[in-house]
Image (cartoon, rainbow, N blue to C red):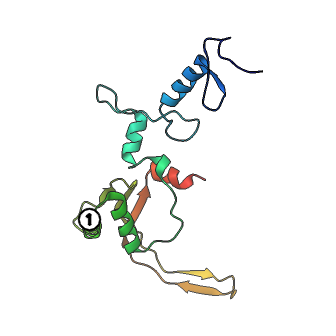
Amino acid sequence: MANTGAANPNTKTGAGGAAKTSTARAATAKTAKSPPARGAPGQAPAKRATASGKRTASNQQQGRQGAGPASLRPIRKHQSRADIIASIAADTGADLRTVEQVTRSLSSTLTRHLMPGGSGRVEIPYLGAALWRGRLAARKARTMMSPLLKREVQIPGRKAQPVARLRTHAVLREAVARV
C-alpha cells in the first residue's frame, strides 16, 4: 500500500520513505526536551536549595559527605600514605605539597588536643569520628590456671595507661555496614 500523503493531511513522508504523523513528531520533541534523570534509576532527583536559600535534608546530607553518597566508590587496593595524598590532591585539585601540609597540620592538631594539658577530645571534621583521651585501668597481678599446661601461671600487673579512644559517628558506621 503506497502512501501518497493526500489521504491524511497530518501524515508526511520522510527521507527514508516512512510516514510520520504530526502527533508522533510532537511526542518525539517532548521526550527530547526533557532533562536527563540524575541519580540511580527509580530515584527522584536530589533536592537543591529552595528560593529562600534554605537547604533540604537531602542537600544537607550531600554537603556533609562531600560529593554525595551516590558518587562514592569503594577503593579495593590498599593505599600507602603517598597514594592517599595523591588521591586527595586529585579529588580537590590542590597540589601534593598543599595536601601534605594539611594532613600534617591535622595530625598536629589531633596530637595537641590529646596530649596532657590539651582539651582531651576532638571531632574530626567530615570524617565522622571523634578522638578522646582515655585511660586503661590498673590491674593487680594474678594467677590463672593454664588450660594448656594444667598448672597455675602468674600474670603480671599493669599500671594505669593513657590511651587514645576513637568513636565513629552513625554516618560512617552506616557506610561501612552497607553490603
Residue 92 in the image: state x and y as whole percent.
32, 58
Mark 1: secondary structure: helix
**Which residue occupies the extreme right position in the image?**
1
Q: Residue at x 52, y 50 (%)?
A: 174
Residue 36 in the image: state x and y as whole percent.
49, 35
| Local crowd size for mark 1, using a 10 Å CA cut-off: few (<14), some (14–19), many (≥20) | few
Q: Residue at x 46, y 49 (%)?
A: 171
Q: Is residue 85 above or below residue 17?
A: below
Say which quadrant the N terminus sits in. top right
Name which quarter of the figure residue 25 lies in.
Answer: top right
Q: Residue at x 39, y 65 (%)?
A: 87
> Is residue 170 in view?
no
Along the viewing direction, whichever of 90 and 118 lies nearer the viewer: 90
> Is residue 70 in view?
yes
Q: Residue at x 41, y 41 (%)?
A: 61
Task: Give the left or right position of residue 118, taking residue 135 as reference.
Answer: left
Task: Give the left or right position of residue 3, taking residue 107 as reference.
Answer: right
The residue beneath circle 1 is 102
Along the viewing direction, whichever of 17 and 122 lies nearer the viewer: 17
Task: Give the left or right position of residue 112, taking residue 35 as reference.
Answer: left
Along the viewing direction, whichever of 85 and 24 lies nearer the viewer: 24
Name which quarter of the figure residue 17 lies in.
Answer: top right
Name which quarter of the figure residue 6 lies in.
Answer: top right
Q: Amino acid at mark 1?
A: Val
Residue 54 in the image: state x and y as whole percent.
31, 30
Along the viewing direction, whichever of 84 and 37 lies nearer the viewer: 37
Residue 40 in the image: state x and y as whole percent.
55, 41
Q: Is residue 113 above or below residue 47?
A: below
Q: Is residue 93 above or below residue 70?
A: below
